[in-house]
């Protein structure tokens, strides 16, 4: 079983939380607890975590999708509270306050059944979690393109779900094969995705919890 809790998003699914432009999610899977991106504000991130009962100490590692402020500016505040290993695309050379920075260029298995796609198109990596030979993909902004990301995930196993920001993605047939999609953050065409996918489209927002 895996549990994905959106901690930071443009909208608030849980109205106790503060919405803000950016993205962060807590990934609990395969015996690991990993913070995926850190939003634009450490204060908002930690306040949202507190309201959800998530402590900084539970975070074992941090995975940064790409070097844009709305995904990284919360990082110094979290590392001040809990200095852990940080996985970054190779476009980022080093992370202050992190005891270890792992720079990723090529696809790699971070832990058993948890993977990075590698840095795609020299800008962004996505996370892939494999369970029962199926793959859940978490993306930050999908700058390389959704089709490129899903193609990078396919050697790990057939992608069945996609969570995260999809930016201007509008080649909708690409996601028809997925079991479900949770479009968050920078996605421009959320309404069109909802209309097309129906029940297979999950609402995002800070405080949304997805258990698989």
Image (tube, helix red, strand yellow):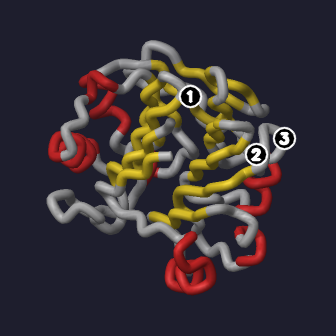
Tell me if 79 is positioned left or right of 122 in this view.
Answer: left
Label 1 or label 3, whichever lies nearer to me, is: 3
Q: CA distance from mark 2 to mark 1?
A: 18 Å
Mark 2 or 1 closer to N-term?
1
Q: Position of residue 61 (x, y in %)?
A: 45, 24
In the structure shown, which secondary structural element does the residue marked by tag 3 occupy? Answer: loop
Q: Are marks 2 and 3 in contact (CB under 8 Å)?
A: yes
Tell me if 18 is positioned left or right of 117 in this view.
Answer: left
In the structure shown, which secondary structural element does the residue marked by tag 2 occupy? Answer: helix
| Whether residue 187 is situated above or below residue 60 in the rendered picture | below
Q: Position of residue 103 (x, y in %)?
A: 64, 26
Q: For mark 1, does the 10 Å Cα neighbourhood hold few (<14), some (14 to 19), or many (20 or more) residues? A: many
User: For the point 27% across and 22% down, which residue is it?
Assistant: 57
The residue labelled by disc 3 is: 155
The residue labelled by disc 2 is: 153
| Whether residue 95 is situated above or below residue 20 in the rendered picture | above
Q: Position of residue 206 (x, y in %)?
A: 31, 58
């Amino acid at each position: 079983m895996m549990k994905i809790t959106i901690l930071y998003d443009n909208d608030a699914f849980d109205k106790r939380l503060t919405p803000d432009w950016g993205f962060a999610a807590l990934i609990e899977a395969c015996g690991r607890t990993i913070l995926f991106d850190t939003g634009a504000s450490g204060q908002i991130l930690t306040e949202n975590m507190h309201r959800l009962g998530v402590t900084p100490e539970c975070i074992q590692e941090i995975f940064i999708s790409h070097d844009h402020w709305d995904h990284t500016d919360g990082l110094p505040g979290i590392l001040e509270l809990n200095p852990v290993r940080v996985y970054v695309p190779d476009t980022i050379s080093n992370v202050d306050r992190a005891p270890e920075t792992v720079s990723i260029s090529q696809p790699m298995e971070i832990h058993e059944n948890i993977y990075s796609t590698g840095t795609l198109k020299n800008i962004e990596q996505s996370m892939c979690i494999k369970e029962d030979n199926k793959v859940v993909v978490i993306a930050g902004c999908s700058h390389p393109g959704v089709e490129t990301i899903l193609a990078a995930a396919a050697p790990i196993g057939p992608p069945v779900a996609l969570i995260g920001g999809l930016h201007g993605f509008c080649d909708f047939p690409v996601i028809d094969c997925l079991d479900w999609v949770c479009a968050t953050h920078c996605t421009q065409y959320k309404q069109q995705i909802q209309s097309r996918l129906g029940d297979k489209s999950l609402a995002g927002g800070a405080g949304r919890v997805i258990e698989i």
